[in-house]
Image (spheres, coloured by chain):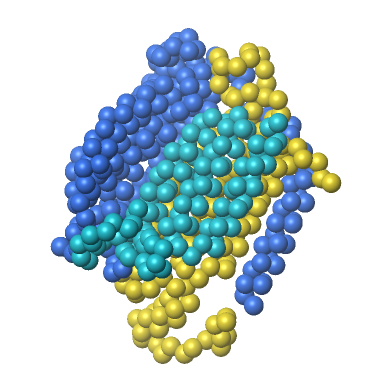
Amino acid sequence: MLEWIALLIVITILTSAVAVLTIRNMVGAVAAVSVVGLGVSVLFVLMHAPDVAMTEAAVGAGLSGVVLALGLRKLGLWRLEDDKGTSHPLVPTSRREDNTDA
Amino acid sequence: MRNLAALLFTGGLSFLLLVIVSQLNLGETPMIVGQRMLNEAGAEVGAANIVTSVLLAYRAFDTLGELSVLFAAATTAGLVLGHRRSDAVPDPDGGFILRAGADLLFPLLLVVGFYIIIYGHLTPGGGFQGGVILAAAFFVGVLGRPGTSLDHGVIIFIEGFAGASFIGVGLWALFAEGQFLKPMLETGTVGDLVSAGTLPLLSLALGLKVGSELAGLLTALSDTEAGEP
Amino acid sequence: MIQLDFVTILYVGGIGLLAIGAAGLVICNNFFRILLALVVAEAGVNLLLVLVGYRGNAAAPILGFGPQGAQMVDPIPQVLVLTAIVIGVGVQALAISVLVRTYRSYGTLDVRELKARFEVDLAAEMGIESTPGSEAPAA
């Protein structure tokens, strides 16, 4: 029973790791890194290591994501694409009436 | 061409590692040092969490080294990033939801962080985990109100005081018993809150230092001047 | 086929993460993605380290919980990985700050362009002439 859960999580982790290198949008790549950290934290729980799991969940899936996202913001790479294909940066240059970004 | 060479290298490396790791029998480990620690940690140190007792009693010097590495990284990052930005494009206002959410989350995160630090020698937890949650608690306020920042003087004071008290406890053990960072004060019964000697004090110093350091680092990162988009 | 027990799945996952991270370090052209590949490789290494101390049918290393007298997993690799995870986030923060400074000075994050401009700037700083290298940049 435990092997199937571990297999599912390992497949998720490897797919997310490939997605880090493949996704063109930088925000998606940072989200994939957080998914890898969260999956590794669940694997630590399955290996009977609760201290390490708590640290990896707090740091790898939490703080590391915040540090990388802040770095993205300062590097000007934080872009969210809407379905029209045009990307708009997070700092608005003019008042927008329709809020299309999430 | 370069990509193909890189993929071949990665394939060969992973094949080599898989062959090597499959020869070790990973299911049963010959725990020589670990078995001694498991057998004697309850009587010698008195903490129920054996990982914390190894981290803060048997290998406390390595924890001090890790604090130095974290301090060097945070200080260098703050130095490289530079000071407050000029009056460039100001951040958009967070709105009511962000402000209310940040104000609601701050006391909850504070309580959870201190709980994990203080009960670190009984349940899974300890200085690092609680310190990270404390850093998040203080940074959530900055995230909710873009444009403000934490007071750098207070952060530096807390960090310095916590680091100095960690070394101070170690020096007290050196002068009293002859070994740097040996756990002092009586052991108590395993499972009580007041047990395991000076371990809760060291946990508290560790948690405060890590928390204030990471909060200062995040503030420096969010304060610096942005590049052009 | 290969038998599917718990330890095999985990070490395949750990080595896979390490290999994908190492491939990303070599292949990627954007500096930020190189940093993300480094983070993925660090997660894989931590997984492998904790796996070394795993013992089947054992309990977590905490006294007072679980069945008493049962065997426990090895606590020593867990202590090492605890330290390694926290140092990893410090290294990531430092790398982000260096990236921000580089972007502020040069305006780009492409590895090949930065390499060419570094050579020109370093040669100008040292006062020697810069000649383009004999190996052409990879296509």
The quarter in which the N terminus of chain B is drawn is bottom right
Relative to C43, say whether A26 is above or below: below
The quadrant of the image that shows the C terminus of chain B is: bottom left
The answer to whether residue B134 of the structure is visible from this angle is yes
Q: Is residue B51 above or below residue C18?
A: above
How many numbered callouts?
0
Q: Position of residue B119 (x, y in %)?
A: 41, 21
Q: Is residue B218 left or right of residue C123?
A: left
The chain drawn in blue is B
Q: Using residue C84 as the reference point, say whether residue C7 is left or right of it.
A: right
Instruction: Please name the residue shown 27% across and 59% down the image.
Output: A98
In terms of depth relative to the viewer, which is nearer, C78 or B101? B101
**Residue at position x 56%, y 42% from top?**
A40
User: According to the rendering, which colour does chain A have?
Assistant: cyan
Left or right relative to C53: residue C84:
left
Residue C76 in sight: no
Nearest the camera: B210 or C37?
Answer: C37
Q: Output the letter for the chain in yellow.
A: C
* Residue A32 percent location from the top left of the image: 50, 52
Residue B162 location (% of width, % of height) = 30, 33
